[in-house]
Amino acid sequence: MKKPLFTGVCTALCTPFLDGKINYPMVEQLLRRQLEAGIRAVVLAGTTGEGATLSNEEKLTLIRVGKSCLRDRALLIAGTGSNDTAHAVALAQSAEAAGADALLVVSPYYNKATEEGLCAHYRAIAGSVSIPVILYNVPSRTGVDIPVSVYRKLSRVPNIAGVKEASPDLQKVGRILATCGPDLPVWAGEDSLAVPVMSLGGQGVVSVVSNVCPAETSAMAQAALAGDFDTAAAIQLRLLGLIDLLFAQVNPVPVKAAMALIGYDCGGCRLPLTQLDPENREKLAAMLRDMNAVS
């Protein structure tokens, strides 16, 4: 049985830019806001953090700055996945040395590894570090949906600490929990399914919407974990309209626009991602006004 690294909300933090470079003072401001809202785990350089367009040195500096700000008040989970196992191993080791508390490792994309290859990839990464490794399954981006049989095998690796399951398949979540039980904690990777996943036994959510509404997202998760599903469902339903808009274009384009609208200018996204289109920006602004998040 593996004790979950965290329960409740882990915010997949967006990476703020200024003149094309990481805006580290804004990183610290965003992290302090998360701490003040009660968030106790944060992913840096993940999908929402545009890890795909950050250099290795940028990722490591981001981890160092984040660790200096968070100290022991929240877990710092670093996105270190790659479709090149050797690169993923090297980055995992560097992230551990830079102060990461755990790693979030996306499955190898483009290559389309077999079950044997997926197991070998993750075992190599986990075996190269002493900190926990969270599997990250996001088939809409990688082109591969990690099978439950692979989860079962990897659940036996001591420092593989669970999975962020970013797929809309609730039946699969149920199969993971039924097959792996307490040997593989599961966190929702889809904001819209946070409460349903927790109702099946998931430990929380790795969230995008918590960039914008950290306190409300945390309250939703804590209610669900306490078994108060009436409260949790009510909050989930209140957030659904905003969640839909945050994924109206590819993440993190909308969430960066939302952050600017509520007073945290995180800059634009790096190419090939571009700006939120005017129609969606108007809808997002109206939604935030309705939620009293912006005047």
Image (tube, grey):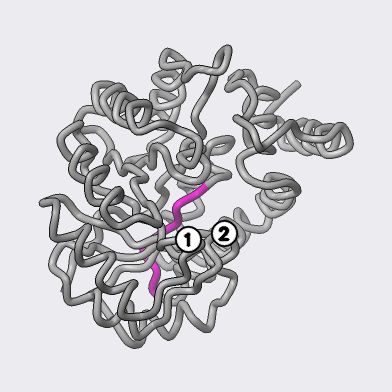
Question: Label 2 sits on what residue type?
Answer: Arg
Residue 255: x and y, percent?
63, 37
The residues bearing labels 2 and 1 have C-alpha atoms spaced at a distance of 8 Å
Residue drawn at x 38%, y 42% is 43
Point out the frontmost of discs 2 and 1: 1
The reply to whether the magenta stretch includes residue 155 is no
Magenta extent? 201-207
Vertical relation: 194 (above or below) 12: below
Residue 214 seen: no
The percent coordinates of residue 197 (x first, y second) are 48, 70
Q: Considering the image in quadrants, where does the C terminus appear?
A: top right
The residue singled out by tag 1 in the image is: 109
The N terminus: image quadrant = bottom left
Residue 274: name its quadrant: top right
Q: Amino acid at mark 1?
A: Tyr
Q: Is residue 202 magenta?
A: yes
Where is residue 275 shown, x and y percent of the image? Answer: 74, 31
The answer to whether the residue labelled 2 contacts the one labelled 1, judged by CB atoms less than 8 Å apart, is yes
- Disc 2 element: helix
Q: Would you identify the image quadrant in which residue 5 lies?
A: bottom left
Q: Residues within 10 Å of mark 1 (few under 14, many from 20)?
A: some
Residue 147 seen by the camera: yes
Name the residue located 24 percent from the left edge and 62 percent from the top edge: 161
Q: Which residue is mark 2?
A: 141
Along the polypeptide, which appears first: circle 2 or circle 1? 1
